[in-house]
Amino acid sequence: MKIEDYRLTDFLPTTKKELELRGWDNVDVVLFSGDAYVDHPSFGAAVIGRTLEAAGYRVAIVPQPDWHGDYRDFKKMGRPRLFFGISPGCMDSMVNKYTAARRLRSEDAYSPDGRHDLRPEYPTIVYSKILKQLYPDVPIVLGGIEASLRRVTHYDYWQDRLRPCILCDAGADIIVYGMGEKPILEVARRLSENIKAKSEKLASLKDIPQTVYLDAHFSPLSTDIVLHSHEECLSDKRAQAENFRHVEEQSNMMHASRIVQAVGSKFVVVNPPYPPMTTEELDASFDLPYTRQPHPKYKGKRIPAYEMIKHSVNIHRGCFGGCAFCTISAHQGKFITCRSKESILKEVKQVIDMPDFKGYLSDLGGPSANMYGMHGRNINACEKCRRPSCIHPQICPNLDTSHARLLDIYHAVDALPGIKKSFIGSGVRYDLLLYHSKDDAANQAAREYTRELITRHVSGRLKVAPEHTSDRVLRLMRKPSFQQFFDFKRIFDRICREEHLNQQIIPYFISSHPGCHEEDMAQLADITRKLGFKLEQVQDFTPTPMTVSTETWYTGYDPYTLEPVFSAKTPREKEAQRQYFFWYKAPNEPQKPNKPYESHKPHKSHKPYDNHRTDHCPEKPDKEKRGRNRRH
C-alpha cells in the first residue's frame, strides 16, 4: 500500500489531534523515541508500542522530542496512566553521532533527511531528567540498546571514564534490557494491578525477569553473583575486567543468576533474562499490524535507515558467534529463535505488495545470515553452558550446523510470484560453511548452501568479515583463523568460474583492536596486497559499552585470562595502524572517511529493532556499510 492509502489512525498516535481521532482523552503509556517513528518491525519503539497495543493498552509515541525551551513535546500527551517509556534509538546515540576519532558524523540515519540535530547526546538521560522534572510521580521505564548495554558499570569512550549503571545518571525507575516484548508487558500488567489495588506503583516490579533497578535496602542472596562495586572498579581496572566476565557469561546463559553491584549507598540489581522466545512468540511480534511505513508526518522526507531495510525481511533473532567487539549477544542472547516459514512468507508478501518494490528482496537474513535453524542437539548441555560463543575457539560438537532449514526458506521465498531475486545482505559466517561435522547430511547441506548463496543470492559482491590476518589478534576477536578465509575464497572463485559469474568477495577489516600491533597491520597489508585486494571496507576499532574488546581496551586485561593486552590508544598509534590499509595510495592522496563499523550500526538484515538490531551488533546504513546489531 502507498502511504496515502493509510489513515492516521493506522499508526500509533503522535499528537493530541491523533488521540482525538481515536476518541481517546488519555493514554496508558507514552513512549519517547530518539528515532523518527517508522511503523516497522525493524524499529524498536514501534515494536514495543505495537506489543502493548495488542495487549489492550492505549499507547502514544513522541518521536525525537525537542529537549530545548519549554519542553512542550514532553507535555503534549499529558500524564499517562501507567508509565513513560524511553527508547533512545536503534543505535547507541554516541555511536550514531560520532566516529571512532570522536568527529561528528554528517548524517543521522534514523532522522528525516538524515538530520543530525534532532537527538541529544545520551537521550536516555536527557529525556528521563526532563520527564522526572515535569511528572515526578510517573514511573519511567528505560529500554533500547543505550540503556541495555549500560546496565552496570561500563567504560564510556566518549567521556573516557567509567560510568555507573545508567539509572544512576538518568533518575529513571527501571531498565528493560535486551529484546523487550515480554518484560514490558509484565511491567505494564504489574503497574496496572498496583493502580487497581491502590498500592505503591513500583512495589511489585522487583522480581520481573530481564529488568534492572536500584535498591538502597537490598540484601544479596548466596545464589546471587556480587560484582566488585563501582567504586572498586574506579580504583582498580582489574576489578572491572573481572566483573565483565560474569556479566557476559550470565547474559548468554539459558538459566542465569541474578547480578548485584554496589554503587555508593545503593545496589544495582540485574534480574536474569527471560528464556529465549519461542517461534510462536517471535512470530506474534513480527505479525503485529505494522504499516511498514514512516509516519505520514515525514511525507517527502527520506529516512536513510528505512530506505536501507524497507525491502528486506528478518528471519531470526540471536547470534552465537560471540565476536569480541559485537553487542548482539549481550542484547539478543546467543540462542537462535527462528520465525516460522509461514510468518516469513507473510511478510515477504507484504513487501511484494509495496508500490515501489521491483522484485528484488534486498536481504533475507538476520544478525548472522546463515544461523537460521541452528541449535544444540542436546538441550540439557546448552542449559548448563557458560560459553559466550558456540563456534569459538572451535565449533561446539553439540551444535547442529545444518543449513537445510535455511535452504527451505530460500526456496519458498524465491518461488513466490513477484520475487525475481532474494539477496543475502547480512554477514555470512563462512566458518559454518567450511565446518565438517559427523553429520554427512549437514555437510552436504552446507555445500549446497554455499553454491546457492554464491550463484543465486549475491548482487555481484559478497561481503564477509575476516577482520584481520593475524591469528593472535583473531583469537582476541573470537574470529576464526585467516586460513579459513583463504579456503572460502578458493571455493568462491571456483564456483564463480564454473558458473561464469563476474562476482567479487569483499572482506572487512579492523585496525587498532586490542592485541593488534603495528607489525600485525604490516602483515595484513602484505597479505591482502598479494591477494589483490585494495581495501576500502575498513574501520578503526571503536570501544562501545559491554563488549569484551572494550573492556580489554580500557582495562588492559583480557577479562577471561586477566593477562595484560596491548592496545593502540593515542591518535598517532591508531593512525599509524590505519594507514596500512591504504598501502596503494599516494602519501598525500586524500582517503575516504572511515565507514561506521560499530557494534550497533544498522544492517539491512539485522533491522534496527534487533538492536532495540542492534543496536547489533547489529550497525550507519549505507550500501557499503554493515552492521553489528539490531533492535529494542
Image: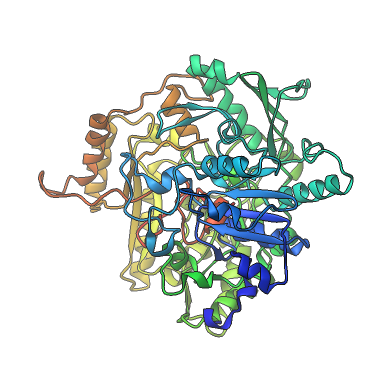
Residue 5 in view here: yes
Could you say which is closer to the camera, residue 438 or residue 181? Answer: 181
Measuring from the top left, give residue 439's x and y in whole percent: 63, 53
Could you say which is closer to the camera, residue 437 or residue 93? Answer: 93
Which residue appears farthest toward the bottom when viewing the image?
417
- The picture quadrant where one finds residue 221 is top right
Seen at 38% across and 58% down, the residue is: 115
- The picture quadrant where one finds residue 211 is top right
Position of the N terminus, as image quadrant, is bottom right
Identify whether 192 is placed above or below 412: above
Measuring from the top left, give residue 391's x and y in whole percent: 55, 42
Colour pattern of the rendering? rainbow
Identify whether 559 is placed above or below 16: above
Identify whether 340 is placed above or below 611: below
Residue 631 in view here: no
Measuring from the top left, give residue 34's x and y in whole percent: 51, 52
Seen at 55% across and 36% down, the residue is: 150
Measuring from the top left, give residue 174's x and y in whole percent: 68, 39
Could you say which is closer to the camera, residue 345 or residue 151? Answer: 151
